[in-house]
Image (cartoon, grey):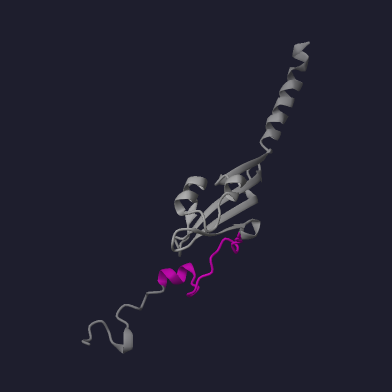
């Protein structure tokens, strides 16, 4: 009786393994936000050291001002081998005054996600469009030709 169901069991196992490869993959990248800790940061009261002790090291600091600390958190989702797409994102910015106390705590979400769509896998460039043959044979006859302002390389300046 077991030999009778062996092919059906093997086919069912193969189908289940194939479907398991098409499962949704969820991933978290970056800082893990704790709402209680974020709410504990008080503008005018907390300093760099207290924020460092409460939230930890920032994901990155501001490029133009080291007084801005950013904590970035992103959740992505994708199906099988497709590119992951963000479905939730939080950017927490802690801005410090010159004295080192917290001025403000701002939060941004999915509106800060940039979508970049390249054009046909080609980068438009300035310059001339030449064919392969023009590139190979374009300098024939250019040797000894006059250079800048009608002078050759042998002419004194």
* Most distant residue in the top direction: 1
Residue 141 shown left or right of residue 49 in the figure: left
**Magenta part mainly helix, strand or loop?**
loop
The region drawn magenta spans 114-137
Q: Quadrant of the C terminus?
A: bottom left
* Residue in the foreground of this view, choosing between 62 and 21: 62
Q: Can residue 146 be seen in this view?
A: no
Q: Where is residue 58 in the image (x, y as percent from the top left)?
A: 49, 51
Residue 134 within the segment the image draws in magenta: yes
Q: Where is residue 143 in the image (x, y as percent from the top left)?
A: 31, 77
Task: Work out whether 96 lies above or below 35.
Answer: below
Q: Position of residue 77 (x, y in %)?
A: 65, 45
* Residue in the foreground of this view, choosing between 73 and 2: 73
* Residue in the foreground of this view, choosing between 87 and 51: 51
Task: Work out whether 20 lies above or below 13.
Answer: below
Residue 135 within the segment the image draws in magenta: yes
Quadrant in which residue 81 is drawn: top right
* Residue in the foreground of this view, choosing between 45 and 136: 45
The residue that appears at 48% across and 46% down in the rendered structure is 53
Residue 28 shown left or right of residue 51 in the figure: right
Q: In which quarter of the image is the N terminus?
A: top right
* Most distant residue in the front direction: 45
């Amino acid at each position: 009786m077991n030999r009778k169901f062996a092919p059906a069991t093997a086919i069912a196992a193969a189908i289940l393994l194939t479907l398991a490869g098409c499962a949704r993959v969820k991933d978290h990248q970056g800082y893990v936000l704790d709402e209680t800790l974020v709410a504990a940061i008080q503008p005018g009261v907390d300093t760099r050291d207290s924020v460092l002790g409460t939230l930890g090291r920032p994901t990155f600091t501001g490029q133009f001002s080291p007084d801005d600390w950013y904590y970035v958190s992103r959740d992505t989702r994708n199906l099988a081998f497709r590119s992951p797409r963000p479905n939730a994102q939080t950017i927490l910015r802690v801005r410090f005054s010159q004295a080192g106390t917290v001025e403000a705590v701002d939060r941004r979400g999915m509106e800060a996600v940039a979508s970049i769509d390249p054009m046909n896998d080609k980068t438009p460039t300035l310059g001339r469009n030449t064919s392969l043959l023009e590139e190979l044979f374009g300098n024939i006859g250019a040797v000894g030709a006059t250079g800048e302002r009608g002078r050759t390389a042998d002419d004194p300046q």
